[in-house]
Amino acid sequence: MLANLSIQNYALIDDVSVSFFDGFTTITGETGAGKSILLGGLSLVLGKRADLSSLKSKDQKCVIEAEFDISKYQLKSFFEENDLDYEETTILRREILPSGKSRAFVNDSPVTLDVMRSLGDQLVDVHSQHQTMRLTDNDFQMKVLDALANNAEYLSNYAKSLDELKKVSKELQKLVDFQSEADKEQDYNTFLLKELEDAKLKEGMQEELEEEYEQLNNVEQIMEQLSAGHQLLNDEQLGVVGRLTDLKRAFQGLVDFGTDYKTLYDRIQSVLIETDDISSELERLKDGVEADPERLEVVNGQLQQLYNLQKKHHTDSVTDLIEIREELAKKVETVANIEDSIGQKREEVNMLTQKTDAWAKKISEGRKAVIPKLNERLQKNLASLGMPSATFKIEVNSSKSFKTNGKDDLVFLFSANKGSNYGELKKVASGGEMSRIMLTIKSILAEYESLPTMMFDEIDTGVSGEISNRMGEIMQQMSSTMQVFSITHLPQVASKGSYQFKVYKQESSEGTSTHIKQLSKDERIQELAEMLGGKSLSESALAHARELLQ
């Protein structure tokens, strides 16, 4: 409930702070006193957009602060989702700076206007003539039926099922689209994959082939160099092996003359062993080298195949070609198996469609069952509001498509007079009739839903006498389960409030300003008497005012 409202530097308001209470509160005041200004200030802190024209003094900021007791509302999840500190006494603040910038806060944490508006919608329902047009909206009309049918749980399950159905349907469409595109590329991808598979790619093969190619392509030069090396080591006159053998023999006699000579001898022997081994390896390599034109042609062909593949796939390594081969293999396999995937996904869609449809049928059955009850309640209440011949034609028909709130189309027609044709509310109901219908529906909803604070802005326009008295009684009844405000110009409605506030203007040397105050019982009598008979208070008007307050 709204516990306190503070407004500074807004329109005609300098600085106003007022506390409110649970139950039914009426707000009165002369035309032009500023009742709409008060509501406008509240609307800003509930998330309405603002501009510089809202500032009374253009060089000072406008600050509007509303304190709410939200202990009875289930709003903890909202605060968690928006990373806000949850407090049972929550404060919404709006600041409009002289620069034109606007700032919004919830419990001193800055928030976006969307977050403030979303929270505000759950705290206060401002009913104005503009809001009355919601009555003509099918979604709102369906909400009324769902409230009476106690469809909340069914609607929740339906929404979850529908979300899952939409998700899986999108996945199916993606598979179908992928198949359509993939079919066009499948032959080409298969051809590319076969090329890469035929190349029998493996890590390091390019380096091995290039090495073998160089050996085969230079076989004569290799043979000449190997033969020359072998000759240098084994020539009878000047060969390195023979010279080292002579050197070893010369030092053999010095071995017993000391450690240094023995070490030197061992080194000479090691060099001789290594040189002899090199000679053997040269001979082995020389004997193994031979010209092989056919093998050279094969190796050259394999290398050219690699180079062509690298050029085609814009790479310069076998590693990259192997990765491309694996990706192509996956694509080809995926397309080959896509029909199975699509079939499985279609089965999932069909299963979810049946599940969602089952919830929709339960919702629809509940709606149809409460139509007679809603019709009876509407006609009875409207008869007491001066519309004895008002009747409704309400039908729920199955739709072919799933909607956010079920699978129904709603026909909600109205006739104000006996014998008149039924028509859509917005076409056949007057403004006064719409207000009374909306009040009746809100009072019915209040019995079935936990509604936020209700603010009625001159919903009694165009009515008087006993009808206005009945409207006041309806709002008074609603206030037994919720906080209700009514901005009114009718004494019959104003008198039904447990509390009454007066909005008034005061003039001074500095200008005109709007104020609001809670009226005592005597002040209420005087205010009601003025509303009944004008400023010149007659005893009959005062007596009537006292009677209204009984």
Image (cartoon, rainbow, N blue to C red):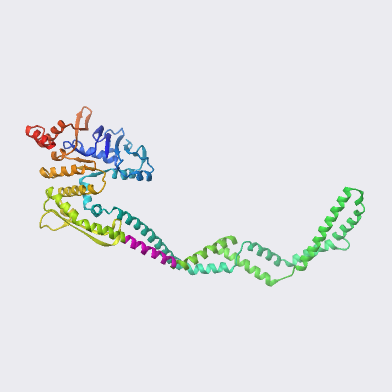
Residue 47 position (above or below residue 273): above
Image point 71% across, 65% down: which residue?
215
Could you tell me which quadrant the C terminus lies in?
top left
Within the magenta stretch, is there residue 344? yes
Q: Residue at x 84, y 57 (%)?
A: 272
Location of the N terminus by quadrant is: top left
Q: Is residue 538 magenta?
A: no
**Residue 466 or 228: which is nearer the viewer?**
466
Farthest residue to the bottom: give it.
294
Image-based side of 277 in relation to 254, left or right: left
As rendered, which of 508 and 280 lies closer to the eye?
280
Evaluate whether residue 316 shows in this view. no
How many numbered circles are shown? 0
| Residue 168 against residue 432 in the figure, above or below | below
State the residue at coordinates (19%, 41%): 486
Q: Position of residue 458 (x, y in %)?
A: 18, 42
**89 w.r.t. 444: above or below:** above
Residue 53 location (% of width, % of height) = 27, 38
Question: What percent of the width, then of the height, locates residue 462?
Answer: 13, 45
Using the image, determine if residue 359 lies above or below residue 47: below
The stretch in magenta equals: 340-357
What's the magenta bit mostly, secondary-structure-wise? helix
What residue is rendered at 63% in x and 63% in y? 206
- Find residue 216 and report its image quarter: bottom right
Q: Is residue 371 left or right of residue 214?
A: left
Q: Position of residue 436 (x, y in %)?
A: 16, 48
Is residue 534 something that shows in the picture?
A: yes
